[in-house]
Amino acid sequence: MKAWLIAGACLLLPRLTVPSSPRWFRWADAGLAAALGVFGLIVGSYLLARTYLTTRSVARVPEPLRDHAEWFVENYGRDDRGVLLRERSFFGLTMIGERMEGDTVVRYMFHGTTIHGGQRFCTEAEKTARWVTPIAPAGAMDALVLVAAQQAWQDLRSQPLTYFHRQGRIGQVIQVLQEKRPRPRVAVLGMGAGTLAAYAEPGWQISFFEIDPAVVRIAEDPAYFTYVHDCRERIGDNNVKVILGDGRIKVWQQEDRTYDLLFMDAFSSDSVPVHLITKEALNIYFEKLAPGGILVVNIANRYLNLAPVLANLAEATGRQAVVGMDSADPAIGKFESNWVLLARDWADFGAIRDDVQRWPTDTDRHWRNLLRPPSAKDLTDSNLADWKKDFLFRSRFEQQLNEAAVRSWRQAIDRESPAEIRSWIQAEIDRAWERENARRQRVGVWRDDFSNLLRVLN
């Protein structure tokens, strides 16, 4: 865009070397200047209208122009009827919006173009219709019914949504944590809506590290989100800390071997601050992790594949690493996400070790070892049967096989020996591992003085 503007400006410069120009040439000069001016006016007006004309603000447009403004908003403007708050700070624009999903209201925090947490609420009308009106209590039962209604509403809003759903990978990580540490100490870099506070139970200690004061104010205000507020009531105000400042610096200032679980979830819109995922940063995190502790890094991103970065960092620092992808389920408020877990020893992953993929397309397992490929030699007869089902399922859709062809393929595979099947699986593993290694070699080991985002573009 800048190049076009510079070229247009050059065309408007007077031709000092030409003493006189034909009249048509002067008219062309004037016409070009006028055309560029009109073009700039149209583009500027469009951008201003996109910025300031919304479904709410259009009501303030004077009557003669309101019909045109409403048409513009309907086709090009923003629908801000669900926007509760819009606050800009040094770190960007934070917005709170809500919408109806089924019979409940879901409220989301946006930073830039990315959702940073959400919470489900029940509307006042729904609370009345669901819990009070049908029962029509009388006398002493009134209080019991209202208590039950309040508890049901509390249960609804206490469910962690979006990337942190209990039925997703984070729910699995929390389960492993609680099996190892009934009274864990948890650190979270990046507060968002405070969703992870929903997991905290009596005996927990949880610390949030957040650089943006606006995010802290919003997350702690129960008028917008109640995760942190409810957590304080549940586990005690002294067990919930909010530390304002750069996450890496503030974590470095904490005592060593403090945390059993450390989340690195500090996003700036849809990007990860690079200084939080370097070799030096990783060493700081592990200094603060207690023995057996796990580092959890959110690498979900529209544009960057950060798994090779974390794999190289884990290998360079002598740690273990697995990556897990979570699919979206809009019916329960679960978003697609991608997480990397790092630990000092393989045993620290607990039950997750039994959920690591046995081959590259293993859909029954949810995690993948980033540092070592699986081996077909370790597969049992039951595993081979699972691979056959997976192979036939993939082949059916990739090669558009009909039922007769699938039966023929199944019979052919069943005639092969287990050793032959293992050789096929191992070849599949080796091909995938070669591709992964090639990506990792291009990325290198990120340090405070070296990183290359161009090498991790999707």
Image (cartoon, rainbow, N blue to C red):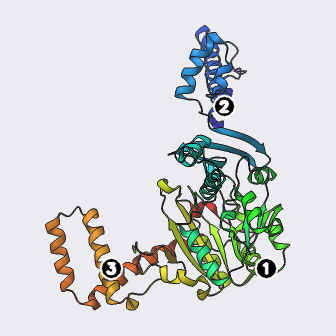
**Neighbourhood count class around disc 2 (C-alpha, 10 Å): few under 14, some 14–19, many 20 upward:** few
Q: Quadrant of residue 227?
A: bottom right
The residue indicated by pointer 2 is: 51
In the rendered structure, which disc, 2 or 1, sits on the residue that comes first in sequence? 2
In the rendered structure, which disc, 3 or 1, sits on the residue that comes first in sequence? 1
Label 2, label 1: how far apart the Cα atoms are: 46 Å
In the rendered structure, which disc, 2 or 3, sits on the residue that comes first in sequence? 2
Amino acid type shown at disc 3: Asp
Asked which secondary structure carries label 3, the reply is: helix
Q: Percent from the top left, x then y, of residue 26?
A: 64, 12
Q: Nearer the observer, disc 2 or disc 3?
A: 3
- Residue 119's place in the image compared with 319, above or below, is above
Amino acid type shown at disc 2: Thr
- Residue 87's place in the image compared with 355, above or below, is above
Amino acid type shown at disc 1: Thr
Q: Quadrant of residue 406?
A: bottom left
Q: Percent from the top left, x then y, of residue 212?
A: 79, 54
The residue indicated by pointer 1 is: 258
| The one of 145 and 27 positioned closer to us in this rendering | 145
Asked which secondary structure carries label 2, the reply is: helix
The residue indicated by pointer 3 is: 386
| The one of 103 and 112 positioned closer to us in this rendering | 103
